DNA sequence: AAACCATGCAACCGCCAGTAG
DNA sequence: CCTACTGGCGGTTGCATGGTT
């Protein structure tokens, strides 16, 4: 017998949230912060479980959510990050200000996976499908270097292969298959640092060298991945844009200084961990859809003038 | 106009790790 | 050390919507 859900025990409401519930939750968190999620429903007068409240807040009510469609730049970044982090949606989301893990996960499952497959790239390994299909046995004892593996296995952020460098999703573009660029194991040239890492093919190394480098690179990667600023800098030099040659839509207000006046009021209630993880915050609700507009009004009322 | 299908998205489920008692 | 509780995460489901037949 499986466990009953937390909602089952207490005959709690499930399913879509009504505007009234949203408002209750929003007002409560605005006023008191979220503190202990499990006690929020009671305090806010909601027939929901704490988990449900938390999810609703994180995925929908948070005033700093970006909403709207993903830009090409964001999509490429997600692909890049997925190649490094695998299905660690929350970690990926932490590097896309204003986007939730759920949103990114949905995008990946419904859209990006398909796009990659159309381009002949395996969405799991980020390698050409032909290589994945044919080459299973070739690297027998080595697990895939991409996705679902500890970060320390990666010596650098994953670039698209050189031959894929233009217009990743350009309908006219079709990637060359394996032969032209060989194995797509992401790596560095020796002596590379986070900032001057050269995307290239992995070099053959001895185990000792690998271990040493792993340690070194792990530190770099940890730093890089934990710092959106560093990541941004690294990406600016090395990233999808430069590789994919993608037209970047300008988003002038996308990143703001956390000390900006508009965000200062939010800092009062924003969970500290989130503040630390996302120093680069965007203005809330840049591109709200219609549904988002309602919430924008609500959140603006709730947060704009505390 | 109705039925069917595909897609996107919101929310739930179940597991896990951390922690307080 | 054990147990219960909580928050967080990734996988999955189910509904709403829009497009097609």
Image (cartoon, coloured by chain):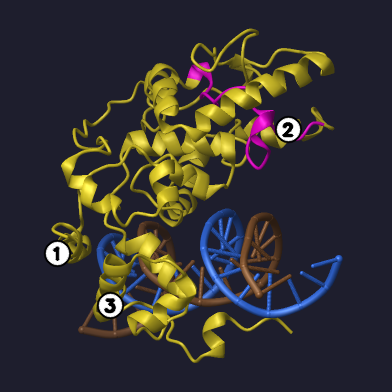
Chain colours: A yellow, B brown, C blue
Work out which quarter of the rendered image holds the C terminus of chain A and state it.
bottom left
Residue farthest to the top? A191
* Real-space CA distance between mark 3 and mark 1, rounded to the nearest whole angstrom: 13 Å
* Residue corresponding to mark 3: A24
Instruction: Check contact, mark 1 vs mark 2: CB within 8 A.
Output: no
Q: Chain of mark 1?
A: A
Is A234 placed above or below A134 here? above
Mark number, residue A148: none
Contact (Cβ within 8 Å) of mark 2 with mark 3? no
Residue bearing the label numbered 1: A301
Earlier-in-chain disc, 2 versus 3: 3
The mark lying in front, picked from 1 and 2, is 1
Q: Which residue is tagged 2?
A: A134
Task: Give residue A121's position: percent from left, percent from top.
Answer: 55, 35
Mark 1 crowdedness (10 Å alpha carbons): few <14, some 14-19, many ≥20? few
- Tell me which chain the residue with mark 3 is part of: A
Q: Position of residue A256 (x, y in %)?
A: 24, 36
Residue A225: x, y in percent? 52, 32
Among the two numbered marks 3 and 1 on one chain, the one whose residue lies closer to the N terminus: 3
> Which quarter of the picture shows residue A44?
bottom left
- Span highlighted in magenta in the image: A142-163
Judged from the image, the secondary structure of the residue bearing numbered disc 1 is: helix
- Viewer-proximal residue among B8 and A8: A8
Residue at 42 percent across and 24 percent down: it is: A235
Compared across the picture, whether A144 is left or right of A256 comes to right
Residue under disc 3 on the same chain as residue under disc 1: yes
Which of the two marks, 2 or 3, is nearer to us in this view? 3
Q: Kindly indicate the quadrant of the structure image that contains residue A169.
A: top left
Q: Is residue B11 above or below residue C19?
A: below
Asked if residue A306 is positioned above or below residue A40 in the image, the reply reads above
Q: Residue at x 40, y 28 (%)?
A: A229
């Amino acid at each position: 017998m499986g466990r009953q859900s937390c909602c089952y025990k207490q005959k709690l409401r499930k399913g879509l949230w009504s505007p009234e519930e949203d408002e209750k939750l929003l007002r409560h968190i605005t006023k008191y912060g979220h503190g202990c999620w499990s006690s929020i429903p009671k305090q806010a007068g909601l027939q929901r479980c704490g988990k449900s409240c938390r999810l609703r807040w994180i995925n929908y009510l948070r005033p700093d959510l970006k909403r709207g469609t993903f830009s090409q730049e964001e999509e490429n970044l997600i692909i890049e990050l997925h190649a490094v982090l695998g299905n660690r949606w929350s970690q990926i989301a932490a590097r896309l200000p204003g986007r939730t893990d759920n949103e990114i996960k949905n995008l990946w499952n419904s859209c990006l996976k398909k796009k990659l497959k159309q381009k002949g790239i395996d969405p799991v390994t980020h390698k050409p499908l032909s290589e994945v299909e044919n080459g299973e046995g070739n690297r027998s004892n080595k697990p895939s270097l991409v996705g679902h593996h500890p970060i320390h296995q990666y010596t650098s952020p994953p670039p698209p292969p050189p031959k894929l460098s233009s217009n990743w999703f350009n309908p006219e573009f079709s990637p060359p298959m394996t032969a032209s660029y060989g194995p797509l194991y992401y790596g560095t040239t020796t002596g590379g640092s986070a900032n001057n890492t050269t995307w290239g093919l992995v070099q053959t190394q001895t185990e000792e060298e690998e271990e040493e480098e792993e340690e070194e690179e792990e530190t770099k990667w940890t730093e890089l991945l934990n710092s959106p600023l560093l990541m941004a800098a690294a990406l600016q030099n090395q990233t999808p844009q430069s590789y994919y040659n993608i037209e970047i839509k300008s988003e002038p207000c996308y990143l703001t200084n956390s000390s900006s006046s508009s965000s200062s009021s939010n800092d009062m209630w924003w969970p500290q961990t989130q503040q630390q993880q996302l120093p680069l915050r965007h203005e809330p609700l840049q591109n709200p859809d219609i549904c988002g507009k309602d919430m924008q009004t609500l959140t603006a009322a709730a947060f704009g003038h505390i």
